[in-house]
Image: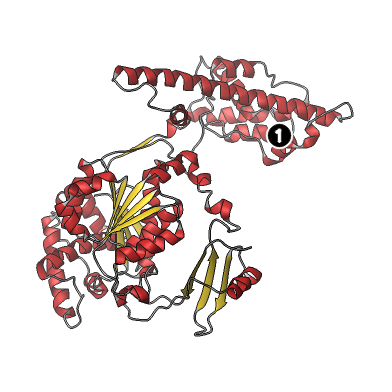
Amino acid sequence: MEPSRVLTSRIVDFPMANSNLERKRSSRNQSNGQQQFAAENHQAPGISASPSEENMRYFNVMILGPTQSPFEESINGNWLIWGEQGQAALEKSSICLLNCGPTGSETLKNLVLGGVGSVTIVDGSKVELGDLGNNFMVDESSVGQSKAKTVCAFLEELNDAVKAKFIEEFPEKLIDSSPSFFSQFTLVIATQLVEHSMVKLDKICRDANVMLIFARSYGLTGFVRISVKEHAVIESKPDHFLDDLRLNNPWPELRRFAESTDLNTSDSVIHKHTPYVIILIKMADDWAKAHDGNLPSREEKKVFKDLIKAKMTASDEDNYKEAIEASFKVFSPQGISPELQKIISDSCGEVNSNSSDFWVLVAALKLLYVYLQKIYQAKAEADFLVVETYAREILKKIGRDPDSISKLTIKTFCKNARKLKVCRYRPIEDEYNSPAQLELQKYLSDEDYSIAVGFYILLRAADRFAANYNSFPGQFDGEMDEDISRMKTTAVALLNDLGCNGSNLTEDLINEMCRYGASELHAVAAFIGGIASQEAIKLITKQFVPMSGTFIFNGIDHKSQLLLL
């Protein structure tokens, strides 16, 4: 297989941030011989690795371009996760990244691979030797060049369908001088900003109704914070959700179907394969008739469960077992076992005059399930038509185009009506100036949250420190002891300003924060970037529920926690 594009890199033990360890890359123009080696010896389709002749610690890695990769269907099949609507939203999105250090670069890399429409990188810095130790998107040949330009070129290689451009400007200057610049974007991802710039940018994006994500890595800690006025989610896709099968209030068509079914039938096949939904509806009706129209109370559930069990005529009647398990749940999934589904789907179910009695009955059972399915589908379609009619009338009444909301959007809304979510986020300024004091004090006194909230306070204290002393704590050699003392004073003052007089942070944590020297470690930056890009996709696609509060990563204990302040 001849690849249309080959991406190569050299993997080595990654150094700590700001290290001057030289990081080498193999040439992107590999020889035909190397490509042949990769094609014949790869362990995973489209990926190969061979030892470097210069240094056996290094490996030359070759990844076949997505247009020719054996993984083509998977790479370009993100719609399997978020569907056609979600992918379309990504492809229409316009992302602005502020600062393309390790955290920003890792965040944007994930979004570019996810298929966003366009990206704009804003960064006024140049590539330095220290960047080679923590940012895999720059190399020694780019030292002294624009960091934004270098990272932009790398990202274009990953996905040439994404429109990428860069602006050589420091984000802080752009925030102060051109606030209207940000209104053109779907989402702004601001990385490594200090507190006063965060507050300014938050106001700008809220006024322009632009979604905003803050992300920052700092030594062995980091945070991610979403800031949006309001975010409505139709497809929340919860991990555990019980569908509404209307067991306690069936609509007329479903009730008529249930009434046509006899649970006392002597036919063992029909008895064994009566859908458990029908069993529950029938049993609930019988109970209501005997109890003045009331359904079982919490205290009566065991009795109701025993009544269903008494209807069983054989120990292998899975439909009755399923009915028992779901008997006290209003919402429950359909209960066709994998084994039964396999039988129903078997080609022998296409019967003819030579078919056995068994397969004739399977064919009849299949029609039963199809009929039940059509009842649910018909009800869903009827509900959709009613909601669509009301929506068109409301749009006309408020002076909007009645057809401005598509049928697909309305249908998706109806399908997920029981899973709707609305997320609102406090402005950054409100949180910083008036945090929820009870919550903050609870976190400070809770051993499980003490380090997370400690990092939260110290990250803010580090910004105050930098504003007062023109450097971050521990950033320069020879000043560590003095910086630790200053950092402790700054942190105590911040706690007092937040109404937490008397609260203290451990000296070990303050010492650790100073030891970081505001460095970005690639491993932490990659993790924070992964979280930020995940939340970005949630916001853009309006699928899944974005996290609330401030996400804090604690690299010391390998814990991640949310602080709701």
425 vs 138, left or right, is left
Residue at (34%, 70%) from the top-left corner?
A: 521
Q: Nearer the viewer, residue 147 or 447?
A: 147
Q: Quadrant of residue 228?
A: top left
**Vertical position of residue 174 compared to residue 61: above or below:** above
153 to 328, vertically: above or below: below
Q: Is residue 208 above or below residue 399?
A: below
Q: Is residue 209 visible?
A: yes
Q: Is residue 110 above or below residue 8?
A: above
Q: Is residue 546 visible?
A: no
Instruction: Report how many numbered discs are placed on residues in the image.
Output: 1
Residue 542: % across, % down: 39, 40
| Residue 359 drawn at (x, y percent) | 81, 31
In the picture provided, is 10 more to the left or to the right than 180?
right
Q: Is residue 40 left or right of residue 222?
A: right
Residue 197 in percent (x, y) is at 18, 56
Q: Residue furthest right?
A: 354
Q: How is the image coloured?
A: secondary structure
Q: Residue at x 89, y 29 (%)?
A: 354
Query: What residue is at 30 percent from the left and 46 percent from the top?
Result: 185
Residue 248 in percent (x, y) is at 52, 23
| Disc 1: which residue | 317
- Nearest to the observer: residue 479 or residue 168: 168
Q: Tell me the quarter of the image containing the N terminus.
A: bottom right
Disc 1 marks which amino acid? Glu
Label 1: few (<14), some or many (≥20) within 10 Å?
some
Q: Secondary structure at mark 1?
A: loop
